Image (spheres, rainbow, N blue to C red):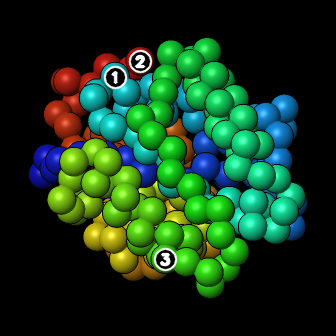
Amino acid sequence: MIGRLDAVLLDRDGTINVKAAEGRYITGPEQLELLPGAAEAIRLLNCTGVPVVVVTNQRGVALGRMDESDLRAVHARLRALLRDHDAWVDAIFYCPHDKGACGCRKPGTLMLRRAGAYLGLTTLRHAVMIGDSSSDVEAGRRAGARTVLLGTGQAAPEGTAVAPTLLDATQRELDRTAPRAHLARA
């Protein structure tokens, strides 16, 4: 059955770009490196008219490892790297808070609901949240979106799809929601 795909919400670290080592953070633009196939996945979504929004926890700000201007520079680098591949994200929402300090930090849903409102969506029922952690999946489920856990060896909750990469997840979602004849590889 063909479904709708109103938006794709993406985690950042470990989904679009290489994640820093455990306990470390990407604190400067020179540290940001795209994962293989990530730009292609986003370009596929762009070519089909599906909005792409990044929703990312950035605890490094709360811990003082970077400030919000450093984070803006990292996000500018992300946008530039994507632009080099003819891809873009429609918006980036981030939570700069520590664990337990807010409702926007995933697995909370405030950041995802803000992303939906930004896109003019009253519900995320026809959106998908793709990420590499259980907090990404839980946030997506709580917000009412479909969820995809990227292949990290974690067990996925019932109803959550699993894919090895963002490109695989994107192709699966596009195949699921659009007639094959209308999909062209970007």
**Residue 50's spot in the image, x, y percent?**
30, 36
| Residue matched to label 1 | 47
| Residue matched to label 3 | 103
Q: Is 143 on the left-hand or right-hand side of 91?
A: left
Q: Of callouts 2 and 1, which one flags the residue occurring earlier in the amino acid sequence? A: 1
Which residue appears at 19% of the width and 24% of the height? 181
Front label number (2 vs 3) = 3
Q: Is residue 90 above or below residue 64?
A: above
The amino acid at mark 3 is: Gly
For the residue carrying disc 2, how many other residues have a C-alpha within 10 Å: few (<14), some (14-19), or many (20+)? some
Q: CA distance from mark 2 to mark 3?
A: 37 Å
Which residue appears at 50% of the width and 70% of the height? 104
Which residue appears at 45% of the width and 40% of the height? 91
The amino acid at mark 1 is: Cys
For the residue carrying disc 1, how many other residues have a C-alpha within 10 Å: few (<14), some (14-19), or many (20+)? some
| Residue matched to label 2 | 186
The amino acid at mark 2 is: Ala
Kindly check if marks 2 and 1 are in contact, taking CB atoms under 8 A apart as contact.
yes
